Amino acid sequence: MTLLDVEGVAKSFPARRRKAVVRAVRDVSFRLDRGQTLGVVGESGSGKSTTARLVLGLIRPDAGRVHLDGMDVLAARGDRLHALRRRMPMVFQDPYSSLDPTWTVRDIVTEPVRLGRRRDRAVPATRAAELLELVGMAPAFAQRYPHELSGGQRQRVAIARALACDPDLVALDEAVAALDVSTRAGIIGLLQDLQTSLGVAYLFISHDLALVRLVSHEVAVMYLGRIVERGPTERVYAAPAHPYTRALISAVPVPDPVVQRNRTRPPVLGEVPSALAVPSGCAFHPRCPLATDICRTIDPPVVDLDDGHAAACHHVALITKEGVS
Ligand SMILES: Nc1ncnc2c1ncn2[C@@H]1O[C@H](COP(=O)(O)OP(=O)(O)OP(=O)(O)O)[C@@H](O)[C@H]1O
């Protein structure tokens, strides 16, 4: 059952340099089913966070459409838009900057509920304890302030706050990137348990390809503002169809030293170009070992391969035949 339907979304920002524009997101389309996780991967500046902000109705796109549960997010205004936003909150990498240090945990986790109510209807006193229980924290934490908590506890509070209005979708923007390995494992386990018990969907934004493989049902790979490949996670990781995905996956170390030694690694050549000067044709062509003339002039369309697996590459047939070692 489709929860989120995003079609042809684009966003540019004015750059500091006069007349230049940053093409942050270009023609992005995807769907996300209820209770599923879509992992969004790509290098820094590829448009992952901007895509999330567009989908959640936090910024307006220049083109495209976004539907949550059949409702047009971009047409919503005022109270309706705020009600939709409460159904799809975001959790950020650094809860220190996203949690108000002068508020108690109780105030932080119940604020979205208070904002959603008329002034004369108080939030039940038990709500903070319920939300803390959901994220595995004792009710006593309600009196504490963010600086009295560990990094993992702060991120649990941020998740509790995100759950306050029974969301359909939570966007997790590098939400575990700042945590140490064992704390990260605890938060990932919590997110997976919450998905099972509450049926919430996640937009899971991360640089970490191994982590995305672990948590995502579907994956979208972004390069300079476009989704260049998307599909069921295991299919994309087992048989990447875009040279960029292939290079990213080949760069993830494997635990077996023999397999690691024998791998051929298609290199990603050079630096990511700036979103201020997106290359003509396929934006990946200056770094692509397979680039030919057509790649320099024509931006490839996204082509469906099978069962929801799709990629935007002129040489997709060549790559899928070769596979990746
Ligand atoms: N408000 C803004 N004004 C101008 N440029 C912006 C703005 N927001 C994002 N950008 C630019 O848009 C591009 C995409 O940024 P975005 O933050 O979405 O990428 P990202 O993939 O999330 O990167 P990171 O992993 O580093 O967070 C970048 O070039 C960034 O500098």
Image (spheres, rainbow, N blue to C red):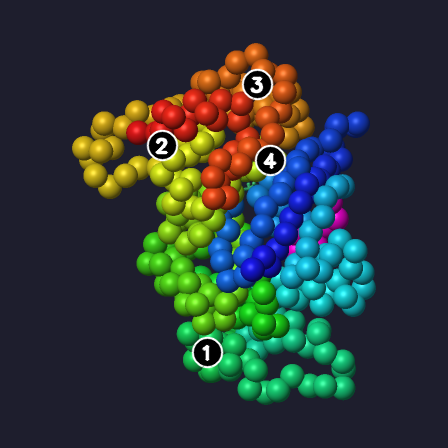
Circle on res. 295: 3
Secondary structure at numbered mark 2: helix
Q: Nearer the viewer, mark 1 or mark 3?
A: 3
Q: Local crowd at mark 2 within 10 Å, few (<14), some, or many (≥20)? A: many
121, 246: nearer the viewer: 246
Q: Which residue is found at the position 73% from the left and 38% from the top?
A: 13
Disc 1: which residue: 133
**Cα–Cα span, label 4 and label 2:** 21 Å
Q: Nearer the viewer, mark 4 or mark 1?
A: 4
Circle on res. 230: none
Identify the amino acid type marked 1: Glu
Residues at discs 4 and 3 in contact (Cβ within 8 Å)? no
Q: Earlier in the sequence, mark 4 or mark 3?
A: 4
Disc 4: which residue: 226
Residues at discs 1 and 3 in contact (Cβ within 8 Å)? no
Q: Point out residue 197 in the picture as x, y percentages from the top left corner.
A: 45, 72
192, 50: nearer the viewer: 192
Residues at discs 4 and 1 in contact (Cβ within 8 Å)? no
Q: Is 111 located above or below residue 269 in the figure?
A: below
